[in-house]
Amino acid sequence: MHAKRRMILALAAAATLGLAACQPAKTAFQGVDLTGADYAQDLKLPDVDGRERSLGDFKGKVLVIFFGYTQCPDVCPTTMAELAQVKKALGPDGERVQGIFVTVDPERDTPELLRAYLASFDKSFVALRGSPEQVKEAAKNFKVFFAKVPGKQEGSYTMDHTAASFLFDAAGRVRVFSRYGSGTQALTEDLKILLAEK
C-alpha cells in the first residue's frame, strides 16, 4: 500500500514538473509586469497641434507613457529628465523609444506650454492634451488616479496623480508599470528587454 502511494506521489510530482517546464519563462522586469493586462488598451487624445493620436500611431516603437502636469514640482520633471537620459544612453536604440506625456491639467497646460516643457527634455517627446472629460476617460482606461488639490492662495492648486510610467512593447501592448523613484538603471533594463523582443 505504501509503495503504491509513493509511486502515485512520484508520478504526480513528475507530471507537475513536466507542466512547469512547458510554461514560458516570465520576463524579469524591474517594474511591475503588466503583460496580458486587460486595461491600458489604447490612448486617444489630441496632441499639441490638435491632431488626434492613438497608440497605433507609434507602432514599432517602445512607448513610455506618463500622466502628469507641467507645474509639478518634482515627480514629473524628474521622470521626464530620467527618460531623456535613458533614451540618450541607449544610443541608436534610443531612437526606437517614444516618450508620451499626458497632461492631467489641461486647464493650465496650454499647447504652447506643453511644447516648450517637453522640448526642454527631449524634442522627440509627444504631449497629449484633451478636454477634462477626455483626460478623465484616458486616466480611467489606464487606472491612473489624479485630483485637484486647492493651494493656500485663492485659485491656486496642485495636482495629485499616479507617479509611474507605463511601458508598451513595439506591438502596442502594455507590459510594465514603472514606479517613480525606481531610477534610470531599472528603466534602462526594462526598455532593453522590450527593445530586444521580436
Image: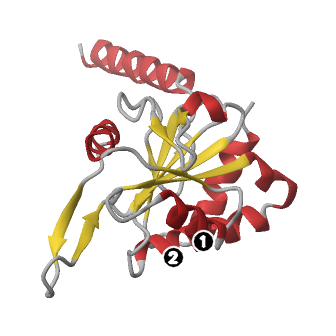
Quadrant of the image for the N terminus?
A: top left
Give the SS element for disc 1. helix
Residue 157 at x, y percent in the picture: 21, 75
Q: Nearer the viewer, residue 78 or 198?
A: 78
Q: Nearer the viewer, residue 132 or 121?
A: 132
Residue type (three-letter) at the residue carrying disc 2: Thr
The residue that disc 2 covers is 78
Secondary element type, mark 2: helix
CB within 8 Å, label 1 to label 2: yes
Q: Is residue 41 above or below residue 120?
A: above
> Residue farthest to the right?
92
What's the residue at 78%, 68% (across, down)? 89
> Alpha-carbon distance for marks 1 and 2?
6 Å
Count how many numbered circles sit on residues in the image: 2
At horizontal 58% and vertical 46% (from top left) the residue drawn is 49
Residue receiving disc 1: 82
- Tell me the quarter of the picture where residue 197 sits: top right
Q: Which amino acid type corresponds to the residue marked 1 in the rendered image?
A: Glu
Q: Position of residue 91 (x, y in %)?
A: 84, 61
Which quadrant of the structure image shows residue 152? bottom left
Which residue is at 64% across, 56% downward?
125
Q: Quadrant of the C terminus?
A: top right
